[in-house]
Amino acid sequence: MADRPEGSAAKGDNRPKLSLHVPEPKFRPGDTVDFSHIDVPEAGSMARPDETCNPAEMRDMAYGLVRVLGEDDQAHGPWDPKLDPDTLRAMLGHMAMTRAFDERMFRGQRQGKTSFYMKCTGEEATSVSASMALAADDMVFPSYRQQGILIQRGYPMIEMINQIYSNKGDKLKGRQLPIMYSSREHSFFTISGNLATQTPQAVGWAMASAIKGDSRIAATWVGEGSTAEGDFHSACTFATVYNAPVILNVVNNQWAISSFSGFAGAERTTFAARALGYGLAGLRVDGNDPLACYAAEQWAANRARANAGPTLIEFFTYRAEGHSTSDDPSGYRSAQERSEWPLGDPVMRLKNHLIAIGEWDEERQEKMDLEAAEHVKKVTKEAEANGILGHGLHHPFRTMFEDVFEELPWHLKEQSAQAIRERETKFPGGLDL
């Protein structure tokens, strides 16, 4: 075999040496934070295109930022969804409940009651507000930080907690990592730990809905880091080729577990701009503005229902806390980032808006927060009666062989019988088999 040629630099020619670019976040632990490089346009300054327009007419929408709530806490511009006060209060209530749920479950993990949890603090609007703009039977394909959708859709909280604890009340029988819920009755597709798999699934479901002449659309959520996965790009291709009635929501919260969004391409362009190359409609939205999140999702839903095509939405937001209970963000980012984030907090912004229009006050907010915390505490106690991590209250041992085959194959029957015999020997009469 011929020897490989040496690099040009070794030959002494005058061509410049190549260098590899490795993305680096602007701020590390201990650094002073300055987010002045982020362009935050005035609320209401972005135009609202027709819902059936050609994606080519929307190029600027992928680089701007749809905003409704201004510094004066008032709604501005053509994207204002003009929601009535009762709807706004319901939205605020769902976000407050989601935050209370997160706090209680985080505490439970720290107490050893479950192995794992993921909070969505600072991102509540991207799930709660967005899902409120969909029909209740539209199929959602979430990632692992969209617990707000289930809370907004009225899924029993005790079922969520049973699943987190993997106890005897867990309808998934302990077969899923905590927080990976599933509810066909609430049109909530099973969460998967494999990144971005939900995107082609959502597109496929939407294509099937169109083939059947149904009226339901699909929406999926994915983190900005997961847009680097091949599944995401396959989803974009199928969505645009078949004009699937689907919404691809990209939650850009700036960070993966310890690497910042630059590793997924954020240094070069916006994530909404990924829509342009595929011929998709693309919107970039203030993800901490609940009204903007609602308006953008509503626009995309109307577009899908009109058979005008799919939409990719980038919700520009910030992950206020750790990636999960297994993560300590103080090890890789400045502690100042959360307080310096220029788009604020979605719960506070909606609360302040309701106060500004004379439909809310601090006393009622305090009461709402207290009631949410008490409700979560009560339901948690009910779920804990079904068992917590390590307490042995789980589904019978034999169920590990169920729900895969309609008729259990002979070799699995033998394995099941052997496993049960061994368990009876080890724990005679002590456990439900």
Image: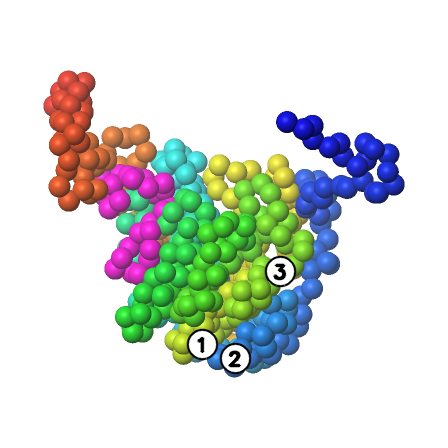
Picture coordinates of residue 210, whole percent (x, y): 33, 70
Decide: few, some or many residues near mark 1? Use Cα within 10 Å; few <14, some 14-19, many ≥20: some
Q: Which residue is mark 3?
A: 270
Q: Nearer the viewer, residue 222 or 232?
A: 232
Residue 113: quarter of image: top left
Quadrant where the C terminus sits is: top left
Residue drawn at the location 51% of the way across and 65% of the way down: 312
Q: Is residue 159 above or below residue 65?
A: above
Residue drawn at the location 48% of the way across and 42% of the way down: 324
* Residue 428 is a magenta residue: no
What is the three-letter code of the residue carrying label 3?
Thr
Start and end of the magenta stretch?
A: 164-190
Q: Which residue is mark 1?
A: 308
Residue at mark 1 to residue at mark 2: CA–CA distance: 8 Å
Q: Residue furthest front?
A: 1
Q: Earlier in the sequence, mark 2 or mark 3?
A: 2
